[in-house]
Image: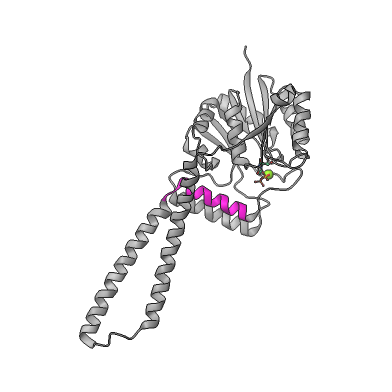
Amino acid sequence: MKKEKISIIVPCYNEEKAIPIFYQEISKIAKEMKKCEFEFFFINDGSSDKTLEVLRELSLQDERVHYLSFSRNFGKEAGMYAGLSHVTGDYVAIMDVDMQDPPSMLPEMYRLIQEENFDCVALCSPSHKGYSFVRKVFTNCWYKLIEKISSTPQVPGARDFRLMKRKMVDAIVSMSEYNRYSKGIFSFVGFDTKWIEYEAPERVAGNSKWSFWKLFRYALDGILAFSTTPLVLSAFVGLLFCLIAFITILFIIIKTLIWGDPVSGWPSLVCIIVFVSGIQLFFFGVMGMYLSKLYMEVKGRPIYIIKETDEDFKKS
Ligand code: UDP
Ligand code: MG
């Protein structure tokens, strides 16, 4: 009987220390899963440490190991997309190399897909263990907000760690947008997903690549990519202000006709002008953000650029 093939996509950015630990662990699991054959696709996302050397070495030792090395850092989203576009497996998993997505969970995920006929088994870590207080508050608020303003549901604490069937992978690859927000894309394509809750462990080596501002921008990207509510909101706020202005004008006309004295009250006038221009600028900014996304999308720039693959390396 032909073995089913599982492809594992592993985005790596400055992970020279974590890769050998991950490889050892995933090889152990691959050995245990006798019914399947494996393919490991590491993505070197423009690392400045010895990540590429480690991957070259691994690809010589083990023919299941492949890698794509980018010409610079394009971000994890680009890494995942490159991986998804290149893998050939019947099932595809995306895993972080820092062991926060434990390979030991893979057999159970495979069993669920096989026996309970899900299209995808995904993991979420809603307790946000290890997050600072501020990050926890922002994260929780973000999930509440996106639930209200987007029709694409987002599971709290969803990680990118998931095992998917080929059909779902093809659907994701067909969404070739430049501004990628994968957690939304996974949800957008639909398919039956089984969610497993777990507590993500600490990373095994190196540091997280996410600063607070990087995360803030990522959260904003999520909103811009999967909701147009801020634009609609700006129209409503505009309408509300027109209404308030109309009522105020009526009030002033009537007041002047009855009592005269048209010039008093200029401080309040200044406040109103400042307030209203603030609101206007704010919504111009919101429009600008959507426009900038549109601008990047229209340019149609490549999502990633490959400088070297394991095949290039083996040939040379
Ligand atoms: N990563 C990447 N490109 C980047 C940043 C991160 O490929 O620009 C990879 C990184 O090597 C790791 C995964 O994405 O395998 C998750 O990154 P990290 O552990 O820093 O994120 P966190 O777990 O803190 O969310
Ligand atoms: Mg991590």
Q: Principal SS element in the magenta part?
A: helix
Q: Position of residue 225 (x, y in %)?
A: 48, 46
Picture coordinates of residue 209 (x, y %)?
68, 48
Q: Residue at x 39, y 69 (%)?
A: 276
Instruction: Please give the range of residues in magenta.
Output: 213-228
Specify whether residue 214 is painted magenta. yes
- The quarter of the picture where residue 252 lies is bottom left
Q: Residue at x 41, y 52 (%)?
A: 229
Q: Quadrant of the N terminus?
A: top right
Q: Colour scheme in the image?
A: one colour
Where is 39 relative to 225, above or below? above
Magenta stretch holds residue 298: no
Residue 94 locus on image (x, y percent): 62, 34
Q: Position of residue 40 (x, y in %)?
A: 68, 28
- Kindly identify the residue that appears in the image at 72 percent across and 41 percent down: 47
Q: Is residue 3 left or right of residue 166?
A: right
Q: Where, by quadrant of the figure, is residue 248 drawn?
A: bottom left
Asked if 208 appears above or below 169 in the picture, the reply is below
- Residue 273 seen in the figure: yes
Note whether residue 197 is visible.
Answer: no
Q: Is residue 171 above or below residue 245?
A: above
